[in-house]
Image (cartoon, helix red, strand yellow):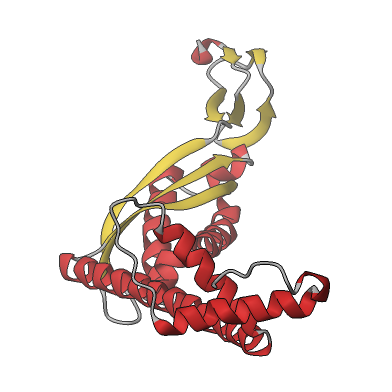
Amino acid sequence: MPNLGVAIVRQYERGVVFRLGEVHNVREPGLRFMIPLVDRMRKVSLRTVTMPIPSQQIITRDNVSIGVAAVAYYRRVDPVKSIVEIENVEAAVGQIAQTTVRNVVGRSLLDQVLTDTEKLNESIKLILDRITQQWGVFVLLVELKDIELPPTMQRAMARQAEAEREKRAKIIAAEGEALSAGRLAEAADVMAAHPIALQLRNLQVLSEIAVEHNSTIVFPAQFLSSVSAVNRFVSEEHPENAEAPTLVS
């Protein structure tokens, strides 16, 4: 039908009309009429294109060989440039995307590739967008979707992660021991200033042991003296009850 001077341009398309080989105008969506055998129309899709970037082996700046695959999203924003300025815009964007990914990743360290992925994505996008502007193409997004490490590097990173976890566990345990030692030192200071506190603690331990009926409890002489100290403390605190029975007769 374009040869008969009639063409239908879809909503997501634009029609670039060539009159005798020269760009005449760009037709909007709808039913469009042209001069038969004089005008020719080439339709350009303005929809976003998803372009996978196949995995390729890249050597990082610290001499580690990794496989990197990515995906790019772009769309044509200038129908005339996407036809006139370049022969095959899809192939051109694909090739320049592969080259840019290899160059950007190759200039980075392995740790940067693994941790600063967003920064690398933005760098690749800016380079692609600057190059493809002359072709009437706008790059929306570039994402590194797969990073393949060699087996030896995977094992080394696993050992490193395990060592890091062990280090954190030892640090936390040491901090707990230090905190516990500090609390024990404070408790010792309190008991040294108040001897009766130590005696009350002994009685509390005795009460906890006595819960088990099948236990045999031996009272050392020091414990008996501790009970005597408790009696003296009670007598001093309550002189009026000095004649009252004591804990140990």
Q: In this rendering, is residue 16 above or below 93? A: above
Q: Quadrant of residue 219?
A: bottom left
Q: Is residue 125 visible?
A: yes
Q: Quadrant of residue 31?
A: top right
Left or right, 113 with reference to 75: left
User: Which quadrant, please, contains the C terminus?
Assistant: bottom right
| Between 58 and 160, the one nearer to me in the picture | 160
Left or right, 72 with reference to 41: left
Residue sticking out furthest to the right: 240
| Between 234 and 160, the one nearer to me in the picture | 234
Left or right, 123 with reference to 54: right
| Between 97 and 236, the one nearer to me in the picture | 236
| Between 170 and 91, the one nearer to me in the picture | 170
Q: In this rendering, is residue 47 above or below 64? A: above
Number of dots carrying numbers? 0
Name the residue located 50 percent from the left edge and 15 percent from the top edge: 3
Residue sticking out furthest to the left: 152
Left or right, 96 with reference to 189: left
Name the residue located 33 percent from the left edge and 73 percent from the top edge: 166
Name the residue located 37 percent from the left edge and 77 percent from the top edge: 167
Q: How far across and how far down the image is residue 228, in percent?
A: 57, 80
Q: How far across and how far down the image is residue 227, in percent?
A: 55, 76
Q: How far across and how far down the image is residue 187, in percent?
A: 60, 81
Q: How far across and how far down the image is residue 5, in percent?
A: 58, 12
Q: Is residue 85 visible?
A: no
